[in-house]
Image (cartoon, rainbow, N blue to C red):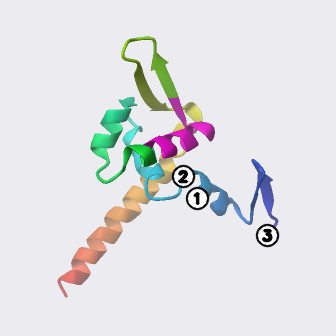
Amino acid sequence: MASEIRNNKHYQCPVEATLEVIGGKWKPIILWQLRTEKLRFSGLQQSMQGISPKMLTKQLRELEEDGLILREVYPEIPPKVEYSLTEFGKTVLPVLDALCKWGNEYLGRECALDKL
């Protein structure tokens, strides 16, 4: 398989590039939370148990740099900031839907195995 270079990174296959952009513990959850509505930082943090403010900030910045989310700052005092998916970010939703479906099947399978 031919390797690809994007953003000065060398990828062996498209799956590696996908995981680089949306992989990890928090990025898929952030994208999932933003699939239906705009959220403020506090709303994201409240819906994601265990993420630190520092980590949430880091992950949001990376997703913004990769063009998946939009950060809108409103000229108010105190400043109001909302996050939403970009049009490009919405293209990842079928991937997240597939992960959700697979996760539900896995959890159902695990529950069935626990009963044996």
Residue 1 badge: 3
Give the amino acid type for the residue marked by disc 2 in the picture: Ile
Mark 3 vs mark 2: in front = 2
Magenta residues, start to end = 56-70
Residue 8: tell me if it is visible: yes
Quick check: 7 above or below 101? above
Dominant secondary structure, magenta = helix
Task: Please say if the residues under marks 1 and 3 sit with CB atoms less than 8 Å apart.
Answer: no
Q: Residue at x 32, y 34 (%)?
A: 42
Label annotation for residue 22? 2
In the rendered structure, are the residues bearing label 1 and label 2 in contact, judged by CB atoms less than 8 Å apart?
A: yes
Q: Quadrant of the C terminus?
A: bottom left
Lower sequence index among marks 1 and 3:
3
Q: Nearer the viewer, residue 87 or 105?
A: 87
Distance Cα–Cα, label 3 vs label 2: 22 Å
41 in magenta = no
Q: Is residue 48 above or below residue 116?
A: above
Mark 1 residue element: helix
Residue 38 coordinates in the image, percent (x, y) = 39, 29
Secondary element under disc 2, as helix, strand or loop, is: helix
Say which amino acid is labelled 3: Met
Q: Residue at x 58, y 58 (%)?
A: 19
Residue beneath the point at 38% across and 43% down: 53
* Callout 3 secondary element: loop
Instruction: Determine the residue positioned at 36% across, 17% down.
Output: 78
The foreground one among 54 and 100 is: 54
- The residue to which callout 1 is attached is 19
Q: State which quarter of the image contains the N terminus.
A: bottom right
Taking depth in this image into account, of 65 and 11 the one nearest to the observer is 65
Q: Position of residue 59 (x, y in %)?
A: 50, 46
- Give the crowd class for mark 2: few <14, some 14-19, many >=20 residues within 10 Å: many
